[in-house]
Amino acid sequence: MPRAYVYFHISGEYLPLDQITREMGMEPTEQWSKGDRGKYVNERHKSGWSLRGPLDESNTVLRDHIEAFLPILETRIEAVKRFSENFDTYLVSVGYYDETASPGLSLSRSMVSRIAALGLALDADLYFAKDK
C-alpha cells in the first residue's frame, strides 16, 4: 500500500538528547544513543534524535508532508540552526509506492530555500514495489 512521511533527524557520535528535546520544546518520535540496539542493526554507530511530520502516511505526496512540517521547524529555527552547526541534520522524506505511479518529489525554489535556511540537508528515500 502506498504511503509517505517526513521526519527531522539529528545524528552525531554523541548527542545531548535531553538538551535537544528541551531546546526543541517537544518529545522526539524516536531517539537513541550510540551503541543502542537498532531495529535493523545490532548496534547503532551514532546517536540520533528524530521527529516525525504531522501528516498521515496515507497522503503520498511528499511535497505536502514537507509543506506541513516546515512551519513546525521554522518556529524553532534558532535551535535547528544551532544543531545544524554541530551535528548532521536532515529533513528526510520517505515514500513507498507501487508500480502504477508515484508523485515523486517536486519542491519549489521557495521550499528549497526554506529548508536551506534551517541548515538542513534533504534526504529522499523512494521505494517501489511490484504488486503480486
Image: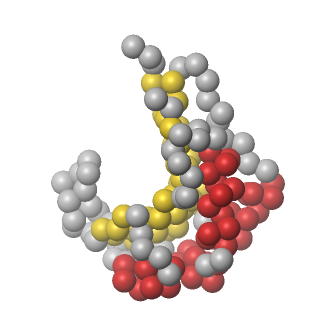
The answer to which quarter of the image holds residue 117 is bottom right
Residue 8 visible, this angle: yes
Q: Is residue 67 above or below residue 48?
A: above
Residue depicted at x 62% and y 69%: 72
The answer to which quarter of the image holds residue 120 is bottom right
Residue depicted at x 65% and y 58%: 68
Depth order, front residue of 53/80: 53
Depth order, front residue of 25/85: 25
- Residue 88 relative to residue 78: left or right: left
Residue depicted at x 36% and y 64%: 30
Residue 104 image point, x, y percent: 64, 36
Residue 77 image point, x, y percent: 64, 78
Q: Which residue lies furthest to the right in this view?
A: 109
Depth order, front residue of 54/13: 54
Residue depicted at x 61% and y 70%: 73
- Residue 115 relative to residue 98: left or right: right
- Residue 64 relative to residue 60: left or right: right
Q: Is residue 131 above or below residue 90?
A: above
Q: Is residue 16 above or below residue 110?
A: below
Residue 11 visible, this angle: no
Give the quadrant of the C terminus: top left
Depth order, front residue of 16/1: 1
Residue 110 image point, x, y percent: 80, 58
